[in-house]
Image: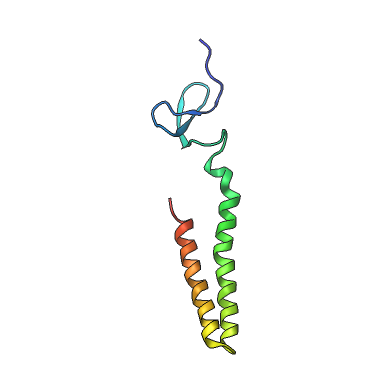
Amino acid sequence: MSQKPAGWYADPELAETRRYWDGEGWTDRVAPAGAPGETRNDQAGLIAAGWIALFVLPIAGIIIGLVLANKRPGLGLTIAGLSLVAGIVWLVILSGP
């Protein structure tokens, strides 16, 4: 009886997941069902970009808001405050499951 080649296959026990077959048996490696070969590590670049945006964009908004606060305190502090809130929201989103 011939074995399947090593690779990701539909998990025989868990619906909507894939399990890695090492050529001899099922391993403990599982991944959500998706495009063939796609794993969480394939999204590492997108995740890194999200973390960079998390820090860069809100910090830029806070700095701009504080600079504007000298001439237009209401507007500047509003921008700084909203940027801080946006940073917290991004942090919550990116540190989810």
Residue at left 55%, top 59%? 51
User: Looking at the image, is 26 positioned above or below residue 45?
Assistant: above
Return the x and y of residue 77 as percentages of the image width and height. Answer: 51, 82
Please count the marks in the image. 0
Return the x and y of residue 49 as percentages of the image width and height. Answer: 60, 56
Seen from this angle, which residue lies furthest top? 1
Return the x and y of residue 44 as percentages of the image width and height. Answer: 57, 48
Residue at left 46%, top 35%? 30
Seen from this angle, which residue lies furthest left? 13
Seen from this angle, which residue lies furthest bottom? 71
Instruction: Pick whichever, 1 or 85, lies toward us.
Output: 85
How is colour applied across the structure in the image? Answer: rainbow
User: Looking at the image, is 18 positioned above or below residue 88?
Assistant: above
- Judge left or right: residue 15 versus residue 54: left
Residue at left 58%, top 78%? 63
* Quarter of the image where one finds residue 75: bottom right
Return the x and y of residue 29 as percentages of the image width and height. Answer: 47, 34
- Judge left or right: residue 48 versus residue 12: right
Residue at left 58%, top 55%? 48
Instruction: Pick whichever, 59 or 79, lies toward us.
Output: 79
* Quarter of the image where one finds residue 76: bottom right
User: Looking at the image, is 65 positioned above or below residue 20?
Assistant: below
